[in-house]
Amino acid sequence: MTNPAKSIRIGTMVSGTKGDAASRIGQIADFGFESFEPFFWQTTTGQDLAELGKHCREAIGDRDITISTLGMFGNPLEETDIDRQTLQGWKDCIDNAHHFGATCVAGFTGRLRGKPIPESLPRYREVWSELARRAADKGVKIAFENCAMDGNWQTGDWNIAHNPDAWELIFNETPDDHVGLEWEPCHQMVYLIEPIPQIRKWASKIFHVHGKDATIRWDVIREHGIFGKEKFVFMRTPGFGDTNWTDVVSELRLAGWSGSIDIEGWHDPVYRDALEMTGQVHALNYLKTCRGGDFVSDPV
């Protein structure tokens, strides 16, 4: 019998930039991850993605593990050499997603550096309308992560898709059904936006979910504010932050959502370095519990 609990899979991200995504998958596949998101930072470094996809699937072998999404993170709207590599990386990931078994490519929209969000919209429309057509031809969805990368409405270097007001703007420019979000609660909490109601409103546009959380220190906010010297929020691995992931999964299920929640590690101030995989496996098991635990088939 098919396990309906796995209509929402719990996995993790693995870096593909240095060409070691397949070996990394092989190292950690038996920890219980149900999906992987190979991702690239600004460039694919000229790799043969068809071969990399083949090797990633070989590393998975006959395990019940999927790759639904590739990540391509950078700024494809600007014109420096590395920005052009990011744009090419998006094209290569879209063209080669099927070699991984993936149906989605996710990352940042990019933005005109140092400019308010609305000033990026013409360039956004130029670049992403073409990429949306390319993705449609390949049967691939495009998902924008909701991370500000320390930017805001007025200025920034990487991404305009970090705010629900910006989502309204960009989806007006690219109204395609296959252009949506790679959503996670952390990036809304960092800006004191309540994340759970977003699922109800935006579920049809959420194509992939990142497993990353945040801890908000309200006592620091009350004493120092959010622009003082004291850090008021920490990004966390799920299970160590403030989000009730049982509610997240419940809201996703109520919306009829299926897909992967892939843990984004390397941000937790406690469970990092030698404790990185300890934190990730804790998050994996925690998220499986929030999903309802082990599937129990009714014998009737």
Image (cartoon, rainbow, N blue to C red):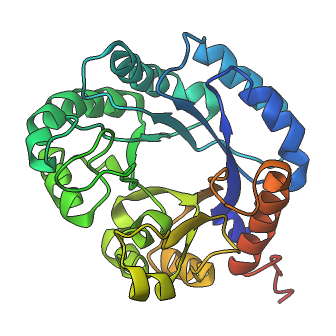
Extreme residue in the front direction: 229
Q: How many marks?
A: 0
Toward the viewer: 212 or 292?
212
Tell me what residue is drawn at x 34 percent, y 21 percent: 83
Q: Nearer the viewer, residue 37 or 237?
A: 237
Residue 2 seen in render: no
Residue 257 showing in the rendered view: yes
> Which is nearer the eye, 253 or 121?
121
At a point 76% along the width and 64% down the height, the residue shown is 284
Q: Residue at x 38, y 70 (%)?
A: 228
Q: Quadrant of the N terminus?
A: bottom right
Left or right: residue 141 compared with residue 287: left
Q: Position of residue 282 (x, y in %)?
A: 81, 67
Say whether residue 16 is left or right of residue 294.
left
* Relative horizontal placement of residue 251, taking residue 286 as reference (left or right): left
Quadrant for residue 135, please give it. Answer: top left
Q: Is residue 167 left or right of residue 5?
A: left
* Quadrant position of the C terminus in the picture: bottom right
Give the image location of residue 95, x and y in percent: 45, 21
Say above or below: 93 vs 166. Answer: above
Q: Residue 150: x percent and y percent?
A: 37, 52
Which residue is located at x 19 percent, y 33 percent?
129
The quadrant in which residue 202 appears is bottom left
Q: Look at the picture and state if 261 lies above or below 93.
A: below
Residue 149 rendering spot, x and y as whole percentages: 40, 48
